[in-house]
Amino acid sequence: MSRRKLYRIIIEAAAGILLIFVLVFFLGFRVTGVQVEGNSFYTDDQIKNMVLDVPMAKNSILAGFIDTKKSTKDEVMIDSIAISRVNRNTLLLQVKEKQMIGYIEFQGQCVNFDRQGIVQIITEEPMENVPQIEGIDVKKAVQGERLTGINTTKLNTILSVGKMLEKMEEKPDRLVFNDLNQLVLYYGTIEVRLGDDENMDEKINRLVGILPELEGMSGILHLENTTEDSESVVFDDATQEEDQEDTQESESSQAAREDTGGDRLDYSDGSDSADTRSMEE
């Protein structure tokens, strides 16, 4: 066999191998499915359009080289998006959205701010899972800038507590400064009184452990005086108090009917029998 013919066979074989490689690479790793996780503010389709609107996204290997930071730089609620492969033909987009500490109503709008006190987005309606902050006033709110005109001590308290609450799956509905300028959290019918800023880490840690035990109940959880040495906390159980009131009302109404023939109903308001109970750590 001549050298020239041998070279041609080698070239043809190499070309064939290269063609097979190309076919396998582009057809075998063609993207046919996309999964999205971690998004709540944006829809799945919005996330896909942000990062996959490029030719590279058609291949599951090349998609890993997409610069997601560049494609999401104008999206105020996106912190990062990571692209990975579930299998040869399926991509996983893991979204990390910016976390909002809370929102303040200002000039009829919801001013949502992050853990640095920077306004990230201003919306007409409250965002899902973002608590309302009450008891503080804002003089100016500009998207992309730190809140101004707000009491520094209160803002620092909100930011500090907000960071601690990030460890909890369930966020409070509202964070309110009461008449004593102390922070109170509201989870549905549960009121959590935190008192002053001392031992706030321990108070939130106790809250994390106790709150699941209060599901379906109503009342006041007292954490004002909680320290590392506290062995228990007090919960004023309004559920039991209401049950006692109903019982006393029923008994008093029955007595009134017996005395007056049902024309006059006298009942006790239950104020002398308010129930409290201590919840052990």
Image (cartoon, helix red, strand yellow):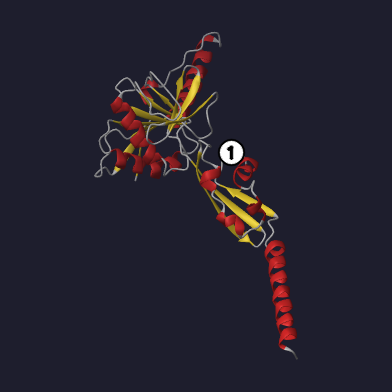
The amino acid beneath tag 1 is: Tyr
For label 1, the SS is loop
Judging depth in this view, the residue of 172 and 7 nearest the camera is: 7
Residue 262: percent from left, percent from top: 56, 11
Residue at (71, 73) in percent of width and height: 15
Give the answer, above or below, for where 19 lies relative to 110: below
The reply to whether residue 77 is visible in this rendering is yes
Is residue 219 at all visible to an observer of this figure?
Answer: no
Say which residue label 1 marks.
Answer: 42
- Indicate the quadrant where residue 50 lies: top right
Q: Residue furthest bottom?
A: 1
Task: Provide residue 229's location: percent of width, then percent of height.
Answer: 24, 44
Q: Nearer the viewer, residue 128 or 54?
A: 54
**Depth order, front residue of 69/163:** 69
Above or below for 265 versus 79 = above
Residue at image point 47% right, 13% down: 266
Residue 235 image position (x, y, % from top left): 37, 34
Q: With 86 as the anchor, is 148 left or right in this view? A: left
